Amino acid sequence: MKKNIESIGYSVFFEKGLESLQQFILNGGYSQVLVLVDRNTNDYCLPVLQATIPDITDYDIIEVDPGEENKNIDFCIGVWNTMLDFGADRKALMLNLGGGVVTDMGGFAASTFKRGIDFIQIPTTLLSQVDASVGGKTGIDLGNVKNIIGTFAQPKAVFISSAFLTTLDERQMRSGFAEVIKHGLIFDKALFEKTQSIDLKDNNLDDIIYRSVQIKNEVITQDPTEKGLRKILNFGHTIGHAIEGYSLENDSNPLLHGEAIAIGMICEAYLAHKINNLSIEGLHAVVEAFNSHFEKYNFNKEIYPILIQLMQNDKKNESNKLGFALLSEIGKCDYNIFVEEDLVLESLDFYRSL
Amino acid sequence: MKKNIESIGYSVFFEKGLESLQQFILNGGYSQVLVLVDRNTNDYCLPVLQATIPDITDYDIIEVDPGEENKNIDFCIGVWNTMLDFGADRKALMLNLGGGVVTDMGGFAASTFKRGIDFIQIPTTLLSQVDASVGGKTGIDLGNVKNIIGTFAQPKAVFISSAFLTTLDERQMRSGFAEVIKHGLIFDKALFEKTQSIDLKDNNLDDIIYRSVQIKNEVITQDPTEKGLRKILNFGHTIGHAIEGYSLENDSNPLLHGEAIAIGMICEAYLAHKINNLSIEGLHAVVEAFNSHFEKYNFNKEIYPILIQLMQNDKKNESNKLGFALLSEIGKCDYNIFVEEDLVLESLDFYRSL
């Protein structure tokens, strides 16, 4: 049995059956419980949740459409209005049951409704369990600019249950796995090596999920508001977010977050090799790690200006220079590295040439 | 010369000529300065500001429409998008130059843009100087529900200059004066008595502004997130906000905030007399204080259900009961008092009967 992880003022509970959840809610003295779901988690995860909190029968369900393209201000306004319709007061509790869209947007909606009500994150995808569950970042997209509006707001608790992962398809599992690999690359060579022998269909993932959350938590508790160290978590994300934003706007079947940042990590490993001492072997290891799990994404030079434009909105930039977190070796990452546009374009060429 | 007031991690500077502002900005090492104005402050206040920061010549102006009815999510989205267009990064500084609409919405936009950038409040109306300038509340309205979406976010500094007050008309001055009277009623009988001999046209208001900010600051530093004591600042606001929301939706020339809460304070003084030991003389003193400055607002019983509906969205409520802060005597106020709907309606009758 895993121990809980203590984060900033709250615990992350690793409990397949969500054993502590009901008592946690009852102890909170809440006036009301709201559950935010999307259509998928409403069908597949809500019954699991309901079975674990039999004594809590009076709650209101808010449903949003699934998919990153719906993590926007319009849906958020819908959530706020529904909270108003349900008469939610400041002592209401919000349970965010879903992937990153639900936990990010639900966290933002809760942290700004009446200037902030309590919320509990129950991430149901591998991606949200290893990425969105700790760190207190909430956010929504504006247009095609990712997570540009948000708050730093800590949940009251996070519950991680592997029971929900059985509802995911292969693409979703791979998408989350990209972040697990990232945690290895930036912080723990042993975890990275472990990921290379994992079969997502067969293996029990409890250990790598736990270790992944532990790494992220170690980083974010040292730097909750991303003044420094925390930026290493953005490895792959400067370019990855731009590709994700482009794909969301232009592809009928857009890339998932992890699929996009896998591409971003290959490109940024190239940058790391060029200007941050990552060895050629290190670069190859990164390329191979992602190529063995992800299909090639095809794009041409014509979209480079769009990608650069999207990168220019990245939160890590300063004074118009593109900011990156770059590996120095497998398991170590630096941050606040500003890179010329030409070299960024070269890294996109590199990816396309693979 | 007044001393600065120390609030939660920042100073309130009382400086007619904004003498410290330029150096304060230069010391911050910001990548960029954004100035949020409305049409009025763009015309009347921006030149004053510009003259005081001659060495800062490179800044971007964001203009919103003036008026409480524009403190909404649509305008806020416009502000966020303009910040993106200007390429604002996390080290940008936002100066909010205007009344409560600009400081509340600008504070919210800044505190949620890229999860929070620095902002300085420069309130230009009497109302915003005595009310919105300290306390770290930011917010916007959703539909006709006031300030329902927002954050607790502290500015880097607040600058209060009486130079801006000369640009205000009489109604705006009275609107702010209602909050000064409120600060006397809830916390300082001497201030209340002083307000009774003030002529808004003739008097220098520096002293009562300073004392008013001092009182508010004393309350909010004891209870920054409104778990208890801070609720006394909401005296008059449960009913006042409902009347303001109604008026915004229905009147061609809607009530200003202070005009609405003046009505709210009369009604809630009635409640205080009925159930919280406020003497009949106390009630009369409140009625007289506001009747001498404000015109009667006429409404009929048919709008009572709308007002009750609006009160039900008030942030102070718990478990569907209407929450109030009520005077016990002039200069003292209690909070967390929950009142039956019938008595609230009776207090509206009382106001109409005056």
Image: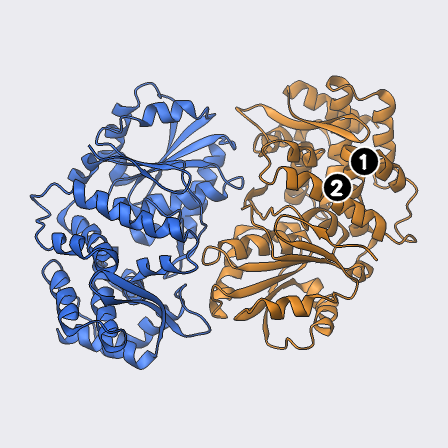
Chain colours: A orange, B blue
Asked if marks 2 and 1 touch (Cβ < 8 Å), the reply is yes
In front here: B292 or B1? Answer: B1
**Label 1 packing within 10 angstroms: few (<14), some (14-19), many (20+):** some
Q: Subunit of mark 2?
A: A
Name the residue carrying label 1: A188
Residue highlighted by disc 2: A215
Mark 2 belongs to which amino acid? Ile
Residue A9 to residue A184: above or below: below
Q: Could you tell me which residue is drawn at 22 percent across and 55 percent down?
A: B188
> Residue A254: x, y in percent?
71, 46
Residue B57 in the image: above or below residue B162: above
**Residue at 65%, 33% in the rendered image:** A231
* Mark 2 or mark 1, earlier in chain: 1
- Residue A316 location in percent, x, y? 59, 31
Q: Residue furthest bottom?
A: B342
Residue A33 at what x, y percent from top left?
58, 69
Q: Nearer the viewer, residue B230 or A349?
A: B230
Horizontal side of residue A338 vs B322, given as left or right: right
